[in-house]
Amino acid sequence: MGITSRMVPTEDASARKREIEEKLKQEQETLSFIRENMEKSDQLTKGMVSILSSFESRLMQLENSIIPVHKQTENLQRLQENVDKTLSCMDHVISYYHVAKDTDRIIREGPTGRLDDYLLCIAKIQKAVEYFQDNNPDSPELNTVKARFEKGKELLEAEFRSLLTRYSKPVPPILILDAITVDEELEVQEDVVLDHLPEAVLQDIICIAGWLVEYGRNQDFMNVYFQIRSNQLDRSIKGLKDHFRKNSASSGILYSPAVPTKRKDTPTKKAPKRPVYIPGTIRKAQNLLKQYSQHGLDGKKGGSNLTPLEGYDHDLRVKHPSDALTEKHGAAAGKDDVLDIEIDSYIHCITAFVKLAQSEYVLLAEIIPEHHQKKTFDSLIQEALDNLMLEGDNIVSAARRAIMRHDYSAVLTIFPILRHLKMNKSEFDTTLQGTAASTKNKLPTLITSMETIGAKALEEFADSIKNDPDKEYNMPKDGTVHELTSNAILFLQQLLDFHETAGAMLASQETSSSAGSYTSEFNKRLLSSYICKVLGNLQLNLLSKSKVYEDSALSAIFLHNNYNYILKSLEKSELIQLVTVTQKKAESSYRELIEQQIQMYQRSWLKVTEHLTDRNMPVFQPGTKLKDKERQVIKDKFKGFNDGLEELCKIQKGWAIPDKEQRNFIRQAQRRVVSDAYRAFLQRCANISFTKNPEKYHKYRPEEVEEMIEKLFDTSA
């Protein structure tokens, strides 16, 4: 046991020793290998150092040989470049001496058709001028190229003028009408583009203008521009005016810029759904008012050519003798047709001016420098604007002269124009934004003039209604509606069509501190007050005129007809709504006046029916013989009734009540009163023997009396 245990450690130590010896042997072999490699590396290093040293030596030798050559070559290249630059500069300088000769032909032939080449030549000349000015200002060549440059600039200016003159044409009237017409069938309106110049020409003009501003140092072309374009703008508007004169009267096609218009296949087929104003109505009113003013207001001429109004049609309108008037006064009607066309033409020319001016500014903005655009535009529109304002002033002057002659119909020509001017004022102001104050104020000044003369005409018309003289020869013999009434109502109906304009016209003459802030409601009240004033003056004058009639019954019929005509006209034309703004009970007041006149008329029958009363009637017993005196009383009653009935029916049959409803009402009421009284009288006298010839006194049966009354106010019976 003890021996075994000692042997085990000995064997382990021996194995460990062998293992260490093997590792030592391996390490010695590795060390020997490293030594060998180190020796080889040292040998290679020495060889590389030797090679690099040899290479460095050779490089130094090469550098010492090449650097002098390189420096010499570099100097030679620099000398060559200097020579080339000198030659180039010489060529460049020499070229300036040949510029005048090289560009002579192109400059002389001008820029037409070859603007780009021409501008290149001008650029060469300009550079030559700059060279000589900087380097040889005393050389004769400087004067030569300067002259050539000025010549080139003159030809460019001439080309600018030529292109503008040649291609600037008036805009055709049909195209203008197409541009200012609103198409109500389109949800999005299609703008009509007014192309004033072909695109290629426009680009040339823009190019020339740009050169003249940048290099030519010249602003004269702006004057040329506004003069030529101003002329075309004016010609375009005059062409539109001529178009209306030639075509509107014959074709009846009146374009209306202020209202929607249905677009057709071609512009010439377009017609407005509703015109700005109704020329025929205004002309009718003017005819009647002129006739009346000539024969009724000045007091110098004889009876009116206007026949009395004969009746109402089914629409309760007065049957005016305007057709006969037109036949009698054909020349005057022709003048009125021309006036209608002139009014419509002027309205359209105002709208056309705004549209054309806007398109001119768009064109101008492409050609004229920005800081000169407003001034040039101001000059460009002056001629056309002045002509329009002058025409407007002439309209105002004509109206003023007519009003001095008591021809108040002239104000009717102002209404549609004034309304259109005010409707377009905001767009007008926007278009003229940036122009001189004198230019901006032209339209407001014209509007003020029209409002002033219009307000004066309205006031004088109201006074003329009040002061119209009571001329016996001018009174309707049949008691129908007086000319003064029909003219006044006709005039007021025109105010209804232009109620906003008329209200503002009256408001413009107010002198209170709030004059600048009137509302439409205030204007409406002013117009209502004015209409009530005219109606009040008319009522007073009619009452005065009624006294011309010797027969009070005819006077009552006259007032009845006029009051009834006024009331029905107010209701039919919706004037009553305006009247009631300030006179709430106007309608009931007229109905009371009408009823009063009916009662006044009915009194005329008292001299007939008084013979049928019991007054002076003898009292007798049945079977008692009447005395001669008593019989005579009954005879006188029959005779008085018969004579009075015949006389009244004969007279009143020639009177007129145009309103069928009123005529029937008055007839029936009178027939009932007279017939009832007559039947009662006959019944009382039925058993009385007062004559041997009863048929001599009992001439009419009650039915015959009723028939006679039914024929009252019937001139055809």
Image: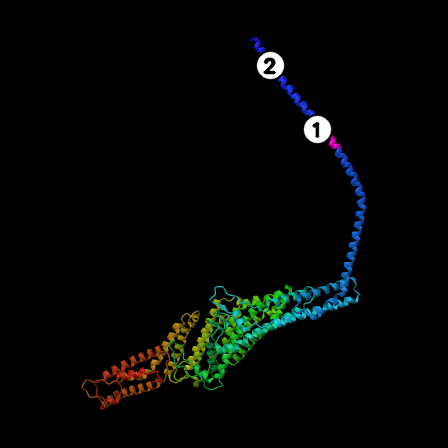
Q: Is residue 679 above or below residue 136?
A: below
Q: Is residue 451 visible?
A: no
The percent position of residue 105, horizontal first and vertical second, equals 72, 69
Q: In the picture provided, is 611 more to the left or to the right than 331?
A: left
- Which one is in front, 463 or 523? 523
Magenta stretch, residue numbers: 36-46
Q: Which mark is residue 37?
A: 1
Count of all numbered marks drawn on residues in the image? 2
Q: Which mark is residue 11?
A: 2
The percent position of residue 480, horizontal first and vertical second, equals 39, 81
Mark 2: give few (<14), some (14-19) or many (20+) Cα within 10 Å.
few
Q: In the picture provided, is 580 more to the left or to the right than 673?
A: right
Q: In the picture provided, is 181 more to the left or to the right than 667?
A: right
The quarter holding residue 193 reads: bottom right
Q: Quadrant of the N terminus?
A: top right
Q: Is residue 119 above or below residue 24?
A: below
Q: Secondary structure at mark 2?
A: helix
Q: Is residue 131 visible?
A: yes
Number of the front mark, 2 or 1: 1
Label the magenta part by its dominant secondary structure. Answer: helix
The percent position of residue 705, horizontal first and vertical second, equals 28, 84
Task: Please name the residue shown 59% across and 11% down the image.
Answer: 7
Task: Please name the residue shown 63% across and 68% down the image.
Answer: 376
**In magenta stretch: residue 38:** yes
Please state which amino acid type lies under the numbered disc 1: Asn
User: What is the residue that sits farthest to the top in this orientation?
Assistant: 2
